[in-house]
Amino acid sequence: MVAPRPGRVAALTGAACLLTTALVGPAPATAGERPPGPGVTAGATVVPVQTTGPADRRFNLVLLGDGYTAGQLPEFRADVEKHLGVLWSIEPFASYRSYVNVWAVEVPSPESGVDCDPGLDAPRRDTPLGMGFWGGCDPGSVGRLLTVDSGAATALADLVPGTTPGNRQIVALANSDTYGGAGGTYATASGGNALSSLITPHEIGHSLGGLQDEYDYYRRGIPGGAHEGGEPDSAHHTVLTERQMRERKAKWWRWLGEESESGGVIGRYEGGLYSTTGVARPSRHSLMKTLGYAFDQVSREVMVRAVSAKVNLVQGHTPNTAPVGADRTVWVETLHPLGGELDVTWTLDGRPVPRTAGARTVDLRRLGVAPGRHTLTATVTDPTPFVRDPAVRGSAALTRRVSWTVDTSVTTRPEPVAARFTGHTPTGAPVGARQVVYADTTHPDDRTLAVHWRLDGRPLANPGNDRDLDLAALRLRPGTPHTLTARIAGTGRELRWAVDATPARAAYELSEPLRTVRRPGRPVEYVYDGPFTLRLTARDDRGGPVVCRFRVDGDGWYTYYGWPTDASAPFRFTPGGTEIDGLVYGRLGTPRAVPWDDATPEYGTHTVEYRTIDAAGNTGPAKRFLVTLVRPAATR
């Protein structure tokens, strides 16, 4: 049996900074369609980790653990927390977290560990999900391909009430410190590897978004050769030039020249789809090429549509199966993304209804509706700047409409409805200073309920849609605790939130430099003539997971995870980078991903920035220091 990992839970939950690099792509993550063995669900427990709404109205992320014995289930819970902490720090998951329910299915394993870990000569394990490296112990596969038994995974996921294959994504975590994972119908990842927390969003990119790998190799350390074939179906690969993309209005032409979320600018970068030449990707290193960076804008747009397509922007509305009278109110309830408010526009017979911008309720009595029959329509759209393609913007994922027939001959029978809150942002944990907070109410037919907002007792102007309040617009200063309240006007019904406007504080520790230079008006400078290490830590007075990131010379922000072979070790910079299992880490200057990238040392002065993202979504200010790399004395 694989021995338990002593002290690992304490190490994970006590780490100040949560944590990847390339993995194998969207090959099937399942090891077959055989029926699950008898009793696969016996002893399984469904644990709601995050509940944002009814399961049948949300996108449900179902996390399964395999190879965790009963005594190791706390390690599974720690792995879940670590993986989610990183996931919520990445767009678009950060902005659309409120669309997602998270469930953990805990099932004790008879044995610890998974099959063929770390190699084909390792023994098979008796585990509920039959997870295994090497594509399920296939000598013709690759070691990092981690598969799961599909029948067993489905049986366990089916234990979560209200979830179906259409509204959920299964992610299976293996009790392993070996680097691995896969994307397909189901996503898989090792639970405890130093890099594993960013395997999960990468594999969800495959499984949910249909994104492809942007690697220029298939087997580690071996260049992939030339791309063969025509224009790929992949949204983020092309054989076209930038000029051809613009002329044909094809692929990512709308994003060309934009500063990339993962560093550099959106353009045309050679390599992808396991080929080194003949095909291009949009950015130098997005999450689909080098884990640790963000999704670039092209992949992010795909993921926004994929997540949003799993839900309905309209969560409820006045019944429209029969005509309604003009003597009442009509309402819609919407979802509430954390990253911004949804837009609601109203039209009557195709003409905009005045003074209703953003409102969720319209009082028809105030419109002076002419006698007869009319069509009232509410259009709900997501104005996210993450989407530029009109086809995506106009799709059901980001635009929904509800229509009613208004008949002035219909008389509404009044029914008493008490004023109360029906749904709201959870009040049990602090809300971040840049998120949208919401408070939904009941919907009387004879009046419109107003929600009034206060910050630290002071009224806040919130015209239009009073069900949402965008805290980002308030530009709250860090360092001061705040209290936010929402009250239904004319009643004593009130909600209260603590607002966390103070980001976690980051600190860095470097190995001993040759010398330290301090000059007025400049960041501190450290001089090295060879490798050096960087450790990032963070403190947050609110608790919860904190993600640390760094970047060099203004390149893309990179998630700090320690070192690929040891999460507790610092990140190591070298003039040419360090090769580990066919990939390259830590080159000071322009990053390298594979051994055949340029390894020429970039001597001179480099700027290193670092910052944090805390559990409430607050991003700390970037701080910086300088590193000057000089030639070793023997080569001068």
Image: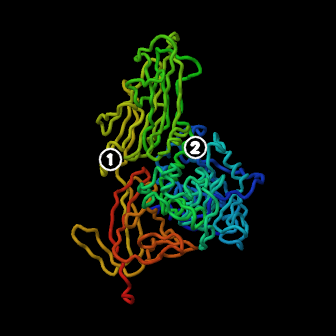
Q: Position of residue 334 (x, y in %)?
A: 49, 34
Q: Position of residue 72 (x, y in %)?
A: 61, 61
In the figure, 285 relative to 510: above or below? above
In the figure, 455 relative to 442: above or below? below
Task: Specify whether 218 is left or right of 398.
Answer: right
Closer to us: 90 or 500: 90
Q: Quadrant of residue 100?
A: top right
Amino acid type, residue under disc 2 in the picture = Phe
Classify the position of the C terminus by image quarter.
bottom left
Among numbered discs 1 and 2, the one appearing first in the sequence: 2
Q: Secondary structure at mark 2?
A: strand
Q: Residue at x 36, y 64 (%)?
A: 609
Q: Residues within 10 Å of mark 2 (few under 14, many from 20)?
A: many
Whole-number angstrom distance, CA of label 1 to CA of label 2: 33 Å
Q: Position of residue 260 (x, y in %)?
A: 44, 57
In the figure, 362 relative to 389: above or below? above
Amino acid type, residue under disc 1 in the picture = Pro
Task: Specify whether 195 is left or right of 605.
Answer: right
Q: Residues within 10 Å of mark 1 (few under 14, many from 20)?
A: few
Q: Is residue 51 visible?
A: no
Q: Quadrant of residue 538?
A: bottom left
Task: Specify whether 527 is left or right of 22.
Answer: left
Q: Residue at x 72, y 67 (%)?
A: 137
Q: Which residue is mark 2?
A: 59
Q: State the residue lying farthest toward the bottom.
A: 634
Residue 104, numbered label: none
Residue 481, numbered label: 1
Closer to us: 358 or 428: 358
Closer to us: 178 or 345: 345
